[in-house]
Every structure is written in structure tokens, then in C-alpha cells.
Image (cartoon, rainbow, N blue to C red):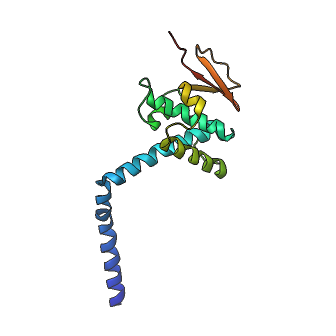
Amino acid sequence: MKFLLLRTLFLSLTLSFLPLLANPLTNNPVYEVSQEFNKQLLCMAKNVYFEAATEPYEGKLAVANVVMNRVANPNFPKTVCGVVYQKDQFSWVGNVNEEIKNKYMWEESLMVARKALTEPHIHDLISKTKALYFHAVSVKPDWNLKRITQIGNHIFYAKNDRK
């Protein structure tokens, strides 16, 4: 009985101090950077997954590079999540329940997202041309943009050069 009482007291004290033990992490710059990186990684992976899960690997790289081109462009938000969730930019945002149905496609999307966030250029043509837009071949937008290439079922575009 005495042992049970001591054990209960110990557990309740331990549980009450757990939030205090976690607090130093929230003030740790390395932890905060890690959390921010993971947040941006998740946004990129979702975008790659929902825009290009069934596309070839090159298509996934191109989609991710478009997002990174936008992050580097002054006309777009400065973070991956800002770009991905910017109003009316990607068709899946607000239109899917964000359930991951294929774990292999999700894993590949995570790989591509990590590559996009840690390497300067992940698709040579998309990076070199600073392509900012793409659409599925089934869509026919009236865009006044320079067509760069088609990869899988996506067509990629850059702004027209005005010289």
C-alpha cells in the first residue's frame, strides 16, 4: 500500500514537471530552426505529393523547383509554406483532405522536398529559366508566359523576357 502511494505520488510529480522540462527546448535556437525546417519540409512535401505524386521523379523535382523559384522571387512570399498556401496558387490547397494514401509516393515526395530545401538547384532547366508556373496538360489557361518544357503531365512556364 505504501509502495503504491509513493509510486502514484512520484508519477504525478513527474507528469506535473514534464511541461517545465520541455520549456528549455522552445527557447533553444537550434530547436526552433529545426522546427521551422520541418514545417517548411512538410509544406513542400505536401505540395509535391498532391501536385505530382503520380509524375516521374523529374516532374516532382521540377514542381519543387518552381516553389523554390517563387520563394526567391520578390513577387511571392518568402517561405515555402507561404508560397504553397498563397491564395489560388495550387489546385489541391483547400480542395483535398490532405490524407496520404500512397506511402511510397509520400516517401518520394519527402525525399524531393528535403532535396529542394537543402540543395540550390534540383532541376537544371527549371532552375536556369526561373520557371514560376506550371499546369496539367488537361488544363488550357490563357497565360502570356514563355513555355519552357513539358515533364510528364505538367507544362512549365517562365515570365516572358522583355528586353
Residue located farthest toward the top when viewing the structure as drawn: 163
Q: Residue at x 28, y 59 (%)?
A: 24
Q: Is residue 131 above or below residue 45?
A: above
* Image location (x, y in percent) of residue 60: 62, 38
In the rendered view, does 1 fall on the left or right side of 50?
left
Nearest to the observer: residue 26 or residue 122: 122
Residue drawn where x is 43% and y is 23% of the image: 75
Where residue 40 appears, as percent x and y from the top left, is: 46, 43
| Frontmost residue, 117 versus 84 | 117
Residue 158 lies, with reference to residue 44, above or below; the image says above
Look at the image and tell me in which quarter the N terminus lies.
bottom left
* Residue 139 relative to residue 21: left or right: right
Q: Position of residue 47 (x, y in %)?
A: 56, 38
Q: Is residue 102 visible?
A: no
The quarter of the displayed image where residue 137 is located: top right
Q: Total of numbered circles in the picture?
A: 0
Vertical relation: 13 (above or below) 5: above
Query: Where residue 45 appears, x then y in whole percent?
Result: 55, 43
Residue in the image at 46% along x and 37% along y: 81
Q: Is residue 51 left or right of residue 130?
A: right
Taking the image as drawn, is residue 26 in sight?
Answer: yes
Write the residue at 61% across / 36% down.
51
Nearer to us in this view, 86 or 131: 131
